[in-house]
Image (tube, rainbow, N blue to C red):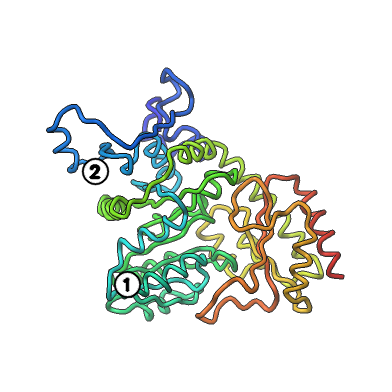
């Protein structure tokens, strides 16, 4: 927070106010509004003694080398910690790096990890490839497991319980507090991919130890950067994550960090607009005869809507659509191809709307994820909502 505000009053400020001021010198500091970009590899010391003593200060934002970060990185870390309600954030080069660093940091040969069946695909691939090669066993569990069910899955060598709520493509809302209670009772760390609930779900208030964000999405907001963050709420976890990040050579471009700092200032307004638009589109789709189900946690029809209402303060722009069973994958492709305002691409959280086929591209092994029809995922951008609905209407007509 800026020097102009009493830190004790921080929580009394609105979200948009806090994010507009976090990571800045203060509104009355002489200089430009935005912090500068600091690029560099070599860090010079005033004397040999300072160089000798620098290693002991690596967790204190004491610059030792470019890979340890600089002022631009630190400013963004302050903003992300403010968003997620944690004490420390670490910036890495991609959202996937934000997934793999904590898994690597907390797991070793012979350990066991629990990951929801609805997890982000590249996270599943990491678990079934490199983690498996390293002697780390993974069990993929039903994302809708309750506390007793989770307790039954935990083994003596289980070290990490991973969560992602809602799921990447099928949008199951997990009972994270219940899962965390079961995990902590057996000494496990709870990790969560919180990209969907970027600020509408406060992870550390619900038992999460490590929160993962793909800053590529809403923080960047303009589909032009790759970044990730790992946020924790204790010095111990901060040291573990920071050490792993440095040891593996993870680094984020300061230019991308600066773009993220620019993008995050408008994120509260973008999220509000995109949340409202996505709900309007989702409700419209739910009423169409070609649609079997809309997988939007904010809809009362969603199977875990009660959990969503309990734990989240709002939604976002991303949800799933299940077509009527009479349509197959080729029909779904024809529908997506007919859309004129929706790009066909992965990512989300940017200003542009996207439609992504998911049937045939999602792996499930725990018996979850069956919805009785072919599926796609929609991201609602900042276009006029009436135009987006009209485009979906003409796209659906090709199915008739």
Residue 305 occupies quadrant: bottom right
Q: CA distance from mark 1 to mark 2?
A: 28 Å
SS at badge 1: loop
Q: Position of residue 259 (x, y in %)?
A: 51, 38
Q: Quadrant of the C terminus?
A: bottom right
SS at badge 2: loop
Whether residue 326 sits left or right of residue 126 in the image: it is right
Q: Position of residue 278 (x, y in %)?
A: 68, 54
Look at 78% across and 79% down and name the residue there: 326
Look at 15% across and 28% down and name the residue there: 47
Q: Is any part of residue 107 visible from this angle?
A: yes
- Between 231 and 148, which is closer to the camera in this rendering? 231
Q: Residues within 10 Å of mark 2 (few under 14, many from 20)?
A: some
Q: Dot 2 corresponds to which residue?
A: 58
- Between 227 and 281, which is closer to the camera in this rendering? 227
Question: Reading the chain from its start, which is encountered first: label 1 or label 2?
Answer: 2
Look at 43% across and 28% down and name the residue there: 36
Q: Quadrant of the N terminus?
A: top left
- Between 372 and 56, which is closer to the camera in this rendering? 56
Q: Dot 1 corresponds to which residue?
A: 134
Q: Position of residue 14 (x, y in %)?
A: 51, 38
């Amino acid at each position: 927070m800026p020097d102009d505000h009493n830190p004790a009053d921080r929580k009394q400020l609105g979200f948009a106010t806090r994010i507009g001021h976090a990571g800045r010198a203060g509104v009355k500091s002489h200089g430009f509004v935005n912090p500068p970009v600091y690029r560099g590899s070599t860090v010079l010391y005033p004397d040999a003694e300072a160089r000798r003593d620098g290693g002991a200060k690596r967790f204190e934002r004491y610059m030792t080398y470019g890979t340890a970060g600089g002022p631009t990185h630190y400013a963004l870390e302050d903003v992300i910690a403010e968003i997620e309600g944690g004490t420390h954030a670490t910036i890495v080069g991609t959202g996937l790096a934000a997934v793999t660093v904590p898994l690597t940091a907390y797991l070793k040969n012979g350990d066991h990890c629990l990951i929801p069946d609805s997890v982000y695909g590249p996270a599943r691939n990491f678990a079934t490839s490199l983690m498996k090669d390293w002697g780390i066993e993974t069990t993929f569990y039903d994302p809708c497991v309750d506390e007793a069910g989770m307790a039954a899955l935990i083994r003596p060598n289980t070290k990490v319980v991973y969560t992602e709520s809602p799921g990447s493509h099928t949008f199951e809302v997990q009972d994270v507090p219940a899962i965390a209670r079961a995990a902590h009772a057996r000494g496990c760390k709870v990790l969560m991919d919180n990209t969907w609930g970027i600020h509408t779900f406060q992870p550390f208030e619900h038992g999460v130890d490590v929160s993962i964000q793909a800053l590529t999405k809403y923080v960047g907001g303009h589909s032009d950067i790759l970044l990730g963050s790992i946020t924790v709420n204790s010095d111990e976890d901060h040291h573990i994550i920071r050490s792993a990040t440095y040891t593996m050579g993870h680094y984020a471009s300061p230019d991308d960090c600066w773009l993220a700092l620019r993008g995050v200032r408008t994120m509260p307004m973008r999220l509000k607009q995109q949340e409202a638009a996505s709900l309007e589109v989702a409700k419209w789709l739910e009423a169409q005869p070609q649609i079997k189900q809309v997988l939007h946690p904010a809809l009362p029809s969603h199977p875990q809507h009660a959990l969503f209402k309990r734990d989240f303060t709002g939604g976002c722009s991303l949800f799933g659509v299940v077509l009527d069973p009479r349509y197959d994958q080729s029909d779904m492709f024809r529908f997506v191809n007919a859309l004129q305002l929706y790009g066909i691409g992965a990512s989300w959280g940017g200003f542009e709307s996207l439609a992504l086929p998911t049937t045939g591209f999602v792996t499930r092994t725990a018996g979850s994820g069956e919805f009785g029809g072919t599926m796609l995922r929609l991201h609602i951008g900042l276009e006029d909502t009436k135009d987006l609905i009209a485009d979906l209407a003409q796209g659906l007509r090709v199915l008739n």
